[in-house]
Image: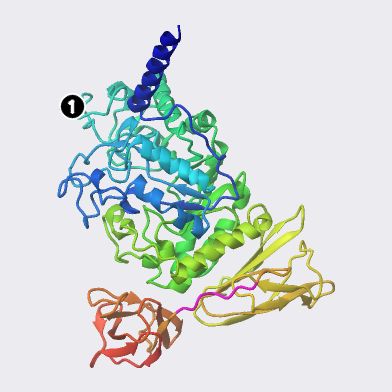
Amino acid sequence: MKKSKRILSIFLALVISLCFEVFNQPAYADSIGSLNTEDRIYMVMTDRFYDGNTTNNGTLNDEYRPGDLHYYQGGDWQGLDSKLDYIKDLGFTAIWISPPQDNQKFSRSGDEAGYHGYYTHDFNSTNTYFGTSMQLQTLIDDAHSRGIKVIIDAQINHTADYLDYPSTVYTPSTYAPVAPFNNPTWYHNNPNITDFNDQNQILNYSLGGLDDLAQENTDCWNALMNAFDGWFAYGFDGSRMDAVMEVPGNYIQAYETHTGKATFGEAFTSSVDTNSAFQNYQWGILDYPLYFGINETLAKGNSWSSIKSVFDQDYKYKDTNKLVTFIDNHDRQRFLANSYDNYARLRNSLVFINTVRGVPDVYYGTEQGDAANNLATEDMQNSTNRAMMSSFSESSPMFQWTQRLNQIRTNYKSALCYGNQREMWYDSTDPVYAYSRRNDSVGDEVVTIINNSSVSQTRTIPIRVESSWTLNTNLTNLLDTSQVATVVSGSTQGSKQITVTVPGDSSMILTNGYPAQYTPPTYTQTRIIIHYNPGYGNSIFIRGNATPLNWTWGQKSENNDLNTWQFVTERIPSGQNAEFKILINDSQWSQGDNFTITGGSTVDIYPTF
C-alpha cells in the first residue's frame, strides 16, 4: 500500500512538472496586491535594460544585432532581476515590463525583430529571448520580496502580421500563430486603418498591418482569457493594455474583471473626451492629453496654456488620481531630445508628474539622463529612445533627484496620492505656474510652484481659501529645505499669501511641518548666452564638438528676450574645453572662428552673420 502511494505521488509530481513546462506557467503564484494610486511605476523595455544571460540572445547578425536597434540587444528577465535592488533604491513600487509572450522572430518585411513584444506568436509561451518560465517566475517572486509589483503589458487586439490581406489563408501554412490562434476566422480580415475618425475602421481594421483579433468570436475570446489565466498565475499585479482604442469597451472591462487586477490602457490621443471615456471600462488610462501638454510646455518652454487646457477638463474623468502620467515612453522621443538636452527642464517635468493628480510613470534611463537624437525621424519606434540602458550609477544627480521625488511621494502620499488638485497661479504669459494638492478629509496639503523660464522669478501667490494653513505658518521647500516661505495676510480682508523666489528652470514643493533637512545635488552647468536678434520667427541654434553638441545638427537655444538667447547643458564635464558655432535656424552659420567655452562656466557671445 505504501509503495503504491509512493508511486502515485511520483506520478502526480511528474504530471504537475510536465504541465508546468507545457503551459509555461507555475501552478500557484502569489501577488502582492493590485496596482493602486500610491504606486510609482518604472517602465522597462525588457530587451533594452540589462543582459543577464548571454545564452538567450539569439543568433548574432540574425535576430540579435548589437547596436542595430531594429533587432534584439540581449536584455532579459535575469538581467532585470539582477537590478531589482537598483529599482528599489530609486524608490519605485511597480515595474511595467514588455509583453512576455513568445513573439514572431521578424516582421513580415524582415526589417525588424519582435524584441518589443508586440508581434505575438504564441499567447501561451514565454519569449525565449527574455528567458524561461522559471526565470519569469523568479523575477516576479524577487520583485515581490522587495515590495515591487510587476505589471504585464497585455495584448488582446492583435497578433503579428500573418494574414496578408486580402488572403484568408496562411501562406505558407507554417507562417502562422501557434494554435489555437491559427484560425483565420478569429480575425477581422480588413486592410489597415487609414481614418482614425472612423470608429468601424478603428475597431475592425488592422493596426499597422498586425492581424486584428475578433473579440466577439466566443472561441477567440475564451482562448485569450485562458492564456491570461496562465500569465496571471505567475503573480502579475496589474496590466497595461495596448491599443485600447482598437478594442471594444465591453471587452476591456471583461478583461479587467477576469484578471481581477487594475488595468490602465493606452489610447494615443490628445482628446480628453476620447481618453476619459476609457475609465468607464477600466481602472485607469495613460494620460496622453497631458503628455502632449508637457511636451509643449515643459520640454519646449512654451506657455502653460497647453497644460491648463487639459486640467480644465479633469471633470470629465471618473477619477483623475487613477490616470497614469508620463513625460516620454517607448513610442515617444525621450524628454531630453524634445527639450534640447535641458536637464533642468527634465527635473521640472519629473517634479510635475510626481505632484499633479495621477500615478507617475518613469521610462527606464530617465534617471541616468539618457537622451536620444532630437531630429525628427520616420523610424520613431527604433530610434535611440529604445537604446540599451546607459548606466546604473546611484551617484548621478538625476538618479538622486528621481529618488528624492519618490521619497516625497511616499512621505506625503495623503496629499499627493489622494488630494484634490486646485490651481493657485496661472497667466498665459507667465512662466510660473502653481497648484495645490489637498486631502480635504484630513487637511494635508502640498503646494508646487514651477518656473518654466531660465530667469529667476519672484511671485506673491494667494493661498487657496480651502487651505487650513494659518498666518505665520512656515512652508518648507522639500526640494531644498533651506528655502522657507511664510504665510502672511493678503491684500483683502481674511486672505493669505506667500512670496517666493524661484530660480530659473526650478521648482518648489512646499508644505508645513518640520521635514528632515535636504540639500539638492550639485549640478555642473555650462551656460552660453548669445546676444543677437535673428528677427521675428527665427531661432538661434548651436553646433559644436562636445556632447550634447555636434557638427551635424544644432541644439536650439532658449529665447530670453528680443536680443538674448541662452543654451544651458549639464553634460560637458567641469574643466573640459569645447568649441562651437552659432547658427540662425540651424542653417546660417556665424562668421569668424569657432567660439570656445570651458565646462562649468558661463560665456557671453556676440556673433555676426
Assign the C terminus to one quadrant of the image.
bottom left
Q: Position of residue 558 (x, y in %)?
A: 42, 78
Horizontal side of 272 relative to 110 (left or right) equals right
Check the image and tell me how it is coloured.
rainbow
Q: Position of residue 554 (x, y in %)?
A: 29, 75
Q: For label 1, count other residues whose C-alpha is less than 10 Å away and answer few (under 14), some (14-19) or many (20+).
A: few
Judging by the rendered image, the residue that carries numbered circle 1 is 174
Horizontal side of 364 relative to 415 (left or right) equals left
Q: Position of residue 402 (x, y in %)?
A: 50, 64
Q: Residue at x 58, y 45 (%)?
A: 36
Residue 352's place in the image compared with 238, above or below, is below
Q: Residue at x 15, y 50 (%)?
A: 61
Span highlighted in magenta in the image: 517-523
Determine if residue 298 is in view. Answer: no
Task: Give the main secondary structure, helix, strand or loop, of the magenta stretch.
Answer: loop
Q: Quadrant of residue 531?
A: bottom left
Q: Is residue 518 magenta?
A: yes
- Between 460 and 328, the one lying in front of the other is 328
- Between 285 and 477, the one lying in front of the other is 477
In the picture as drawn, the residue positioned furthest to the front comes out as: 2
Q: Residue at x 35, y 87 (%)?
A: 575
For the residue marked with disc 1, what is the amino acid?
Thr
Q: Position of residue 139 (x, y in %)?
A: 42, 43
Determine if residue 595 is in view. Answer: yes
Residue 180's place in the image compared with 236, above or below, is above
